[in-house]
Amino acid sequence: MTTFDDREKAFEAKYALDQDQEFKAVARRNRLLGLWAAEKMGLSAESGEEYAKAVVRADFEQPGDDDVFRKLDQDFRGAGLQVSEGEIRSKMDELGSIARDQIRAGD
């Protein structure tokens, strides 16, 4: 029975680690998205950092990525930019992969 208990604890520990890494990767992706959007909107470096933090905070409004998408979409429209849903979602996917790789690498 101890072998089963040990395996169960190992699976639980791996699951917890995976969840922690995913949380960090999503937060990093959102920061990268914010920096990308800030650059597109022509914000200064300092304003871009603040905007990136706002994008990270926006993700805590509700589960999923729709709250982040809505923020970016509304802010692009407010800045008078035409950025398609496809472009935003594609950038979310691209930066999500980069963020996961960075987290796995320990960056």
Image: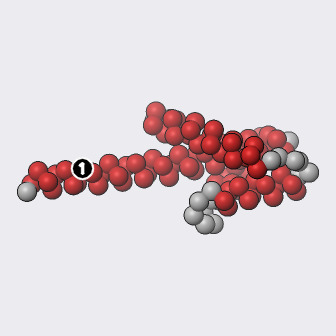
4 vs 55, nearest the viewer: 4
93 vs 12, nearest the viewer: 93
Secondary element under disc 1, as helix, strand or loop, is helix
Query: Percent from the top left, x then y, of residue 16?
Result: 36, 54
Query: Percent from the top left, x then y, of residue 74?
Result: 81, 58
Q: Can residue 2 be seen in this snapshot? A: yes
Residue at the outermost bottom position: 62
From the viewer's perspective, is 68 left or right of 4? right
From the viewer's perspective, is 103 left or right of 32? left
Q: Residue drawn 71% across and 55% down?
A: 69
Q: Can residue 43 be seen in this snapshot? A: no
Residue at the outermost right position: 80
Residue density around tag 1, few if under 14, some if 14–19, many if 20 or more, within 10 Å: few
Residue at the outermost top position: 105
Q: Residue drawn 66% across and 59% down?
A: 66
- Judge whether 74 appears above or below 87 on screen: below
Q: Residue drawn 51% across and 35% down?
A: 101
Specify the color scheme: secondary structure
From the viewer's perspective, is 28 left or right of 68? left
Q: Answer with the quarter of the image where residue 78 lies.
A: bottom right
- Judge whether 74 appears above or below 47 on screen: below
Query: Percent from the top left, x then y, of residue 46?
Result: 76, 44
From the viewer's perspective, is 36 left or right of 41? left
Q: Answer with the quarter of the image where residue 99 lies.
A: top right
Residue at the outermost front position: 86
For badge 1, the amino acid type reads Ala
Q: Residue drawn 19% across and 50% down?
A: 7
Label 1: which residue? Answer: 10
Q: Answer with the quarter of the image where residue 1 lies.
A: bottom left
Query: Percent from the top left, x then y, of residue 65?
Result: 63, 56
42 vs 93, nearest the viewer: 93
70 vs 60, nearest the viewer: 70
